[in-house]
Amino acid sequence: MKRKIIRIDEDKCTGCGECIPNCAEGSLEIRNGKAVLVKEALCDGLGACLGHCPEGALIIEEREAEAFDEDLVEQRLAEIGRKPAPHAAPAGGGCPSAQPFAQAPRPGPAQPAAGDAPASLLGHWPVQLTLLPPTAPFFKDQELLITADCVPFAFADFHRRFLDGRAVAVACPKLDNTGPHFAKLIQIFKDAGLASATIVRMEVPCCGGLTNMVAEARKEAGSSVPLREVVIGRGGDVLQEQDLS
């Protein structure tokens, strides 16, 4: 099958090994002083490892490759003595944080009075991608905002500029277990009835894995909903906006 997968530029690779512990699937190892891909089926192609290479030797490319195999990943992690990233409890379980609900928009002035905190524009709960049910009613005919979890801290006007009127899913391509995220996004693009989707991520290289994951999930789902990306700088400014449709 043709899909996205990691490629290692041997000329740039110094064999430092920084990428090895930061590949959640254990798909990389050092051989003869260079990082190598152990097996194609171990790489999910989402690019969460990209920001960990100080030489920029890791690249995501699209080519013919074996399909990603989660069972093989489990075997590999057992072989090298690593535990898989923990999975959160399924949505709708006993924890109140997983119970979905939508709330009515909160009326109020666009600009709060002096000394007043602005009202939250969050329209539903939960917000973590792991906990979101793919067929939640608050997705229907809405724009989905898929945001890296650092963005609201860096961008001061996050609620008004991005959150207002949108359903939101929060994820981190570097620290989260991206395999379940990818599967959840495919379900959302297939079943949620979205009107469109926007990715808002940070400028750091590892955050590019979020865009790769969302775009690939949309493709895998056979969805044609409009998709765009907004990149936020560490200083809190918008660096780039582009249509990915």
Image: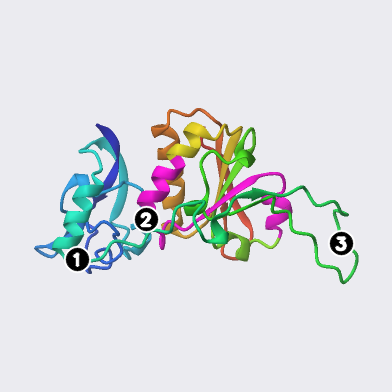
Q: Position of residue 155 (x, y in %)?
A: 65, 61
Q: Which residues are magenta?
A: 157-185
**Is residue 243 shown in magenta?**
no
| Residue 217 position (above or below residue 120) | above
Residue at 49% x, 55% y: name it: 93
Mark 2 highlights which residue? Answer: 48
Q: Position of residue 28 (x, y in %)?
A: 20, 58
| Res. 213 visible in picture | yes
Q: CA distance from mark 1 to mark 2?
A: 19 Å
**Is residue 177 shown in magenta?**
yes
The residue furthest right is 113
Q: Amino acid at mark 2?
A: Ala
Q: CA distance from mark 2 to mark 3?
A: 39 Å
| Residue 107 position (above or below residue 227) | below
Q: Position of residue 13 (x, y in %)?
A: 22, 60
Mark 1 highlights which residue? Answer: 15
The residue furthest bottom is 115
Give whichever of discs 1 and 2 has the lower sequence position: 1
Q: Amino acid at mark 1?
A: Gly
| Secondary element at tag 2 | loop
Mark 3 highlights which residue? Answer: 112
| Res. 10 visible in picture | no
Q: CA distance from mark 3 to mark 1?
A: 54 Å
Q: Amino acid at mark 3?
A: Pro
Residue at 79% x, 60% y: name it: 119
Q: Nearer the viewer, residue 87 or 170?
A: 87
Whether residue 9 sits left or right of residue 111 in the image: it is left
Please tell me how many numbered marks the rendered image carries: 3
Quarter of the rendering occupied by the N terminus: top left
| Secondary element at tag 3 | loop
Task: Give the crowd class for mark 1: few <14, some 14-19, many >=20 residues within 10 Å.
Answer: some
Q: Nearer the viewer, mark 1 or mark 2?
A: 2
